[in-house]
Image (cartoon, grey):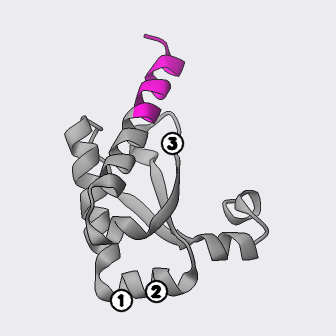
């Protein structure tokens, strides 16, 4: 299997795991409107961003502990999918913050 094939497999695995956590029906996931992740050749460098619609929703989710519950759901879903162990870098943002920064390209630079 080529390096590109392995990356494609991991991309699908990560996408399935994140979507599974979002679709699980738990309260925190119901507020997620988008996600993006970055992964280099090393799976341990995976970084996930889960986006709430607006900053107010993000703050409320953080204050209520929902973001931590969702973080655990994503980590469990990744483990269930067979993703290699990693440090668990999951960040929470809002679409509002991304838009204010000038869009995804500028926000994630």
Residue with the most extreme right position: 102
**Which numbered disc, 3 or 2, marks the residue that appears first in the sequence?**
3
Q: Which one is closest to the eye, mark 3 or mark 2?
A: 2
**What is the secondary structure assignment of the residue under circle 2?**
helix
Indicate the position of residue 47 as horizontal and vertical percent values.
47, 53
Q: Which residue is mark 3?
A: 39
Q: Which residue is mark 2?
A: 59
Q: Which residue is mark 1?
A: 63
**What is the secondary structure assignment of the residue under circle 1?**
helix
Q: Is residue 10 magenta?
A: yes
Indicate the position of residue 92 as horizontal and vertical percent values.
47, 70
Residue in view at x 56 percent, y 83 percent: 55
The boundaries of the magenta stretch are 1-12
**Is 61 placed left or right of 26 in the picture?**
right
The answer to whether mark 1 and mark 2 are in CB contact below 8 A is: yes
Q: Dot 1: few (<14), some (14–19), or many (≥20) neighbours within 10 Å? A: few
- Residue 87 appears in the figure: no
Quadrant of the rendered image containing residue 13? top left
Q: Is residue 102 magenta?
A: no
Q: Which one is closest to the eye, mark 3 or mark 1?
A: 1
**Which numbered disc, 3 or 1, marks the residue that appears first in the sequence?**
3
Quadrant of the rendered image containing residue 21? bottom left
- Against 38, residue 30 (above or below) is below
- Against 4, residue 67 (above or below) is below
């Amino acid at each position: 299997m080529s390096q590109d094939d392995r990356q494609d497999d991991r991309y699908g695995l990560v996408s399935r795991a994140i979507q599974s956590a979002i679709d699980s029906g738990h309260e925190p996931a119901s507020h997620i409107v988008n996600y993006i992740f970055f992964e280099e050749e090393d799976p341990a460098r995976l970084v996930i961003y889960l986006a709430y619609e607006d900053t107010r929703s993000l703050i409320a989710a953080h204050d209520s502990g929902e973001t931590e519950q969702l973080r655990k759901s994503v980590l469990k879903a990744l483990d269930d999918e067979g993703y290699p162990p990693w440090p668990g870098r999951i960040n929470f943002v809002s679409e509002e913050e991304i838009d204010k920064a000038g869009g995804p390209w500028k926000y994630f630079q």
